[in-house]
Image: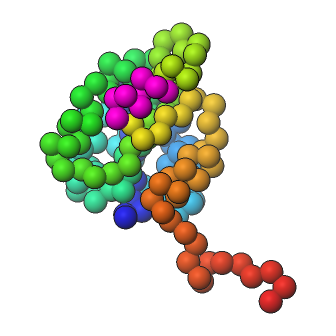
Amino acid sequence: MSQTVVLGVIGSDAHVVGITILEQAFSAAGFDVVNLGVQTSQEEFAEAAVAHDAGAVLVSSLYGHAEQDCRGFHEVLEEHDVDAVTYIGGNLAVGQDDFERTRETFRELGFDRVFDSETDPEDAIAALKQDLQITPTESKRVTVNS
C-alpha cells in the first residue's frame, strides 16, 4: 500500500498549527505528505487521495464541529473509489468530556482510528505504520554487536 498520506483540516476550521506539526512528523518518519491546508472540503480530500494514490487520509479538526463536517465523508471517498485508511484527530466535539463516546461516534462514521488533541504524533505514526503494514527494510535495520 502507498506511503502517501493526504492531510488537511476539514470544514470551516482554520487551525493550521496542528497539521503543520503532523506534516513535519510524518515527513520525518518517511511518509510522502500532501498537506491540503485548512478549510478543506470532503471533495478536496477525495480528489487529492485519488490524484496521489494515497494509502491514508488524515483529517484534523480543532474547533469542535468535526461530526457535522464529517457526515458523509466516507461516502464521498467511496464515490471516488478511494481505498485508504482514514484517521481523524483533534478537539472533535464541543465540550468533549467523554472521549470514548466521541471515539465511538467517529468510528460509526467510518474512521479507522480516532485520536484526541493530546495524542503524540509518534503514536499516530506507529498506528499508521501498523495499519499500512510498513516494516523496516533490510538496509535500514540496525544490527547490534555484529
Q: Residue at x 56, y 29 (%)?
A: 116
Q: Nearer the viewer, residue 20 or 138?
A: 138
* In this view, 114 is above or below 143: above
Res 139 quadrant in image = bottom right
81 vs 19, nearest the viewer: 81
Q: Residue 99: horizontal and vertical position, in percent?
A: 56, 21
For image coordinates 58% across by 72% down, the residue present is 136
- Is most of the magenta stretch helix, strand or loop? helix
Q: Whole-percent x and y of residue 135?
A: 55, 69
Q: Is residue 17 visible?
A: no
Where residue 38 sits, quadrant-wise, is top left
Q: Position of residue 111 (x, y in %)?
A: 39, 37
- Examine the rendering and report whether any part of residue 113 can be seen: yes
In this view, the residue farthest toward the top is 95
Quadrant into which the C terminus falls: bottom right
What residue is shown at x 56% (from left), y 46% (from top)? 124
Q: Quadrant of residue 73?
A: top left
Q: From the viewer's perspective, is residue 38 above or below residue 55?
A: above
Q: Is residue 107 magenta?
A: yes
Q: In the visual, does 17 lie left or right of 37?
A: right
The quadrant of the rendering that contains the N terminus is bottom left
Quick check: is 50 in the magenta stretch? Answer: no
Please indicate whether residue 66 sits to the left or right of residue 123 in the image: left
Residue positioned 42% across, 62% down in the render: 3
Residue range in magenta is 103-110
How many numbered marks appear?
0
Q: Indicate the position of residue 36 as horizontal and vertical percent values.
A: 35, 43
Residue lying farthest to the left in this orientation: 79
